[in-house]
Amino acid sequence: MRTVVLDTNVLLADPGALLGFPDAEVVIPETVLGELDKLKTSRVDPDLRFRGREVSRILFDLSEQGGLIEGVDLPDGGRLRVVPVDADAALPEGLTTRNPDDRILAVAIQVAGKNGGDTTLVTNDLNMLLKAQTYGVLVERYGDGLEGSFGRRYIVRPFKRYKIPIGILSVAVAVFAAIVVVAFYGPGRQTTKQTAIPVEFKELLNAAQRQALDYLTTLQTDPNDEDALRGMGDFYYDLRDQTNNVRYALQAAGYYQRYLRLQPEDPNVRTDLAVEYFYTGQTDKAIKETAEVVAQNPRHMQANYWLGVFYWQAERRDYAAAATQMQRVIELTKNDPNQHALYQQAGAALTQIRKDAADAGKPLPSDTTTPTGGFM
């Protein structure tokens, strides 16, 4: 029997996913229940809270058949069970129980180990997609369409762990904030006295949204404010990362492009722009931008890592170039204790690249090293 492990974002996208895998064993990591429970008191989109309650309702109904830890039968065949992280089993190198995503991934790895590998992690989280693949876990995105095609590219933004819970960047409120800024500060408003945005409205926003509101206000009076342009690019980058919505990638790219016209030598923003190009299917542009950064800054770790990802996941799959880039990241990070996580991640990616190349009939030479634990 096939086993599927469902990530939190899948259930929040479609509570019916609990019943969407006939004749399969559906595993819900215990961490997912904790994340759903937090939504009850979080300041998030009401629709998101509704879907969270709907998941809880379905699980409660199923629990009337028996204990969810032991497993219950599903209406259309198969079984569902809730699985905690096995505290007695050692976690793979690079994972920690302090991180909810890592706990979910650990459950998938542990279940796969017990089921002989016939286990698939289903997630819409782009960070999770790549990380799961580097640990050899079968992974797929839930749902179809344009966004799904990009999700399968396993995009990740290294060096940043977002502290914003799932859904905390409410799209409706963020868009409303932009409308309010235009209404109060836009060029079409004919008033002699600038009207202030009500404090009560600002209190409805989370910290990221309040910052975006300030950026938009600044750009109404100074369209070339560099901090605001970069800040809005980062805001939409994060929105895209949270929602997997390609529209936000386009908006992020637009702000980054405007910023780079003013600061063309900024390697970090150029790398982020490349990521958004890649997310929108413009792989050649993504490679061109990161290659330019690497040419000017050979030790730029983000650009080197991303260039490897682009070569690896591009349609024409340049495994040799991808391996070269990951090996470069390993060399840059191997003696830096602050980059231990990236060191391990690049090593895991390099291992997977070699496997993918071999599976494609294009084996790579084994004259490069892969991290196995501590620093070299």
Image: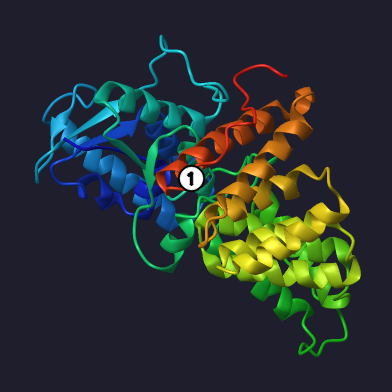
Task: Using the image, determine if residue 320 lies above or below residue 248.
Answer: above
**Residue shown at the point (51%, 46%) measured from the top left:** 166
Q: Residue at x 56, y 32 (%)?
A: 348
- Residue 256 placed where, x, y %? 76, 66
| Residue named by callout 1 | 357
Looking at the rendered structure, the number of numbered marks drawn on it comes to 1
Callout 1 amino acid? Ala
Image side of residue 113 versus residue 213, left or right? left
Question: Is residue 169 something that shows in the picture?
Answer: no
What is the x, y in percent for residue 271? 74, 56
Q: In the image, what residue occupies the spot 47% across and 56% down?
A: 151
Question: Looking at the figure, which quarter contains the N terminus?
Answer: top left
The answer to which quarter of the image holds residue 338 is: top right
Residue 43 image position (x, y, % from top left): 54, 48
Q: Is residue 331 left or right of residue 18?
A: right
User: In which quadrant will I find the C terminus?
Assistant: top right
**Residue 99 falls in image quadrant:** top right
Residue at 63% of width from left, 36% of height from top?
Answer: 346
Q: Is residue 150 left or right of residue 195?
A: left
Q: Is residue 313 above or below residue 184?
A: above
Is any part of residue 333 visible from this angle? yes
Name the colouring of the figure.
rainbow
State the residue in front, 147 or 320.
320
Mark 1 element type: helix
Q: Nearer the viewer, residue 297 or 23?
A: 297
Question: Whole-percent x and y of residue 292?
Answer: 80, 60
